[in-house]
Amino acid sequence: MFKKLTPLYFALSLILVSSPSWGASLYSIKLDSLTQLDTIALEDYQNKILVLTIFEPECPWCMKQFKALEALYTNCDSKLQPIGIGLGSIKGLKAIVYRTKITFPAGQASTEFIALVGQPQATPFSIIVDESGQLITSFQGYIPLEKLEYAFQDICA
C-alpha cells in the first residue's frame, strides 16, 4: 500500500496533518447527501482509498477540482472513491454539484466530520485516507488532473 502511494507524496508536495483519531471514527460519520434524499455513510466505502474534498459554494477552484476528480474517478472507480464534502448553504452546495455534473457522492459536512478533521482555512481542501481508514495526507488548493493521475498511477492502472 505505502509503495503504491509513494508518488503521491512527491507529486503533490503534500503536508501531513497531525491527525486526530481516525479509523473507526471516520467510518461512523454520515453526511446528508446533496444529490439524493438519503445519507452518505462513509462506512460504505471501507476498503477503498478515499479522497475527501471539502468545498464551498461559489468556489471556482472547487469546481475545477471536482472536474479533475470526476475524470480520475471515471478511470479508477473500483479502487478510489472521491467524496465531496460541502461547507455552507445547502442551496449553494447543490448548485456547485449540479454545475460540475459529478457522479461521485457529495454531502454536507456534519458537525462530527468537522470535529474530526477540523475547519479548513481555504477550499478546496482534500484529505486522502487509505483502505483501512487511516489518514495518509491532506492538501489545500487545486491539484490538476495530470498530477492526480501521476499520484494514483499505481492504484488506477
Image (tube, grey):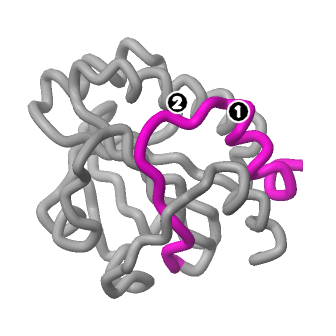
Q: Position of residue 148 (x, y in %)?
A: 68, 41
Vertical relation: 30 (above or below) 51: below
Q: Nearer the viewer, residue 120 or 110?
A: 120
Neighbour class for label 1 at 10 Å: few (<14), some, many (≥20)? few
Q: Residue at x 72, y 58 (%)?
A: 10
Q: Amino acid at mark 1?
A: Thr
Give the residue number, with chain letter if any, for mark 2: 103
Q: Position of residue 147 (x, y in %)?
A: 71, 39
**How many dots with numbers?**
2
Q: Quarter-wise, where is residue 116 in the image?
A: bottom left
Q: Is residue 49 left or right of residue 6?
A: left
Which of the numbered marks, if any, corresponds to residue 74? 1
Neighbour class for label 2 at 10 Å: few (<14), some, many (≥20)? some
Q: Nearer the viewer, residue 42 or 70?
A: 70
Q: Is residue 134 magenta?
A: yes
Dots 2, 1 in contact, CB < 8 A: yes
What span is colored magenta in the figure?
A: 133-157
Vertical relation: 97 (above or below) 109: above
Q: Nearer the viewer, residue 133 or 146?
A: 146
Q: Residue at x 22, y 45 (%)?
A: 108
User: Element type at marker 2?
Assistant: loop
Q: Amino acid at mark 2?
A: Thr
Q: Quarter-wise, where is residue 106 in the image?
A: top left
User: Element type at marker 1?
Assistant: helix
Q: Residue at x 28, y 67 (%)?
A: 117
Q: Is residue 109 magenta?
A: no
Vertical relation: 53 (above or below) 134: above
Q: Is residue 127 left or right of residue 81?
A: left
- Gap between marks 2 and 1 measured at Cα: 9 Å
Vertical relation: 118 (above or below) 20: above
Q: Position of residue 23 (x, y in %)?
A: 44, 83
